[in-house]
Image (cartoon, grey):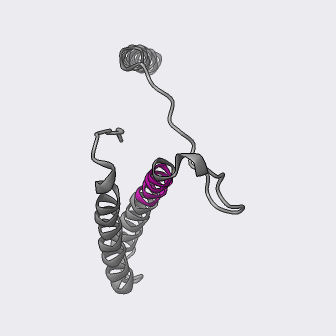
Amino acid sequence: MKVTMQYTIDLNEVPLRLNDMMQDCTTHLETITKLATVIDALNPDKFITHIDFIRKKLFEVDTQLSECGELMQGYKNALNPDEVTPPAEGTAQYPSMPNVDLEALQGLQKQLEGMQKEAEETTDDSQGG
């Protein structure tokens, strides 16, 4: 399960944090590249495991790059609040995240867990279990 974490830093620290995030992305991409060069298609089990690992790491990198883009757009807007411009044509647009009521979200999660438990019990009962 992925969660979103938010914290406050000084505006002038944003580029430094973004550099750190980009370095992390670079490290992941280097690891992925090294692994991709040694994948052995003659061993199907390892091949499948490595491909799955690569795909997951690529997803993590993509997510982190998206976050970097969102943060940089926010940083840019904070530096020049009067010059907020829409993204250039053909570039990704990063929607703002709505405020979420944590208690309501936790209540929904409990409801879903209860529904899942009921569904599992129903499935067990119908299978004679």
- Hey, which residue is sitting farthest bottom in the picture? 37
Name the chief secondary structure element in magenta: helix
* Percent position of residue 69, x then y: 48, 57
Q: Is residue 105 magenta?
A: no
Q: Quadrant of the C terminus?
A: top left
Name the residue rendered at 27%, 45% in the picture.
Answer: 9
Could you say which quadrant of the image residue 34 lies in?
Answer: bottom left
The part of the chain drawn in magenta is 63-76
Name the residue rendered at 72%, 61% in the picture.
Answer: 89
Name the residue rendered at 58%, 47% in the picture.
Answer: 82
- Count every numbered label the image shows and give the total: 0
* Percent position of residue 94, x then y: 56, 48
- Hey, which residue is sitting farthest front in the picture? 82
Q: Is residue 67 magenta?
A: yes
Could you say which quadrant of the image residue 87 lies in?
Answer: bottom right
* Percent position of residue 56, x then y: 40, 59
The answer to which of 113 and 82 lies nearer the viewer is 82
The answer to which of 23 and 37 lies nearer the viewer is 23
Could you say which quadrant of the image residue 3 lies in?
Answer: top left
The answer to which of 114 and 32 lies nearer the viewer is 32
**Is 30 left, or right, of 118 in this rendering?**
left
* Percent position of residue 25, x then y: 35, 67
The relative height of residue 5 versus residue 129 in the rendered view (above or below) is below
Q: Quadrant of the N terminus?
A: top left
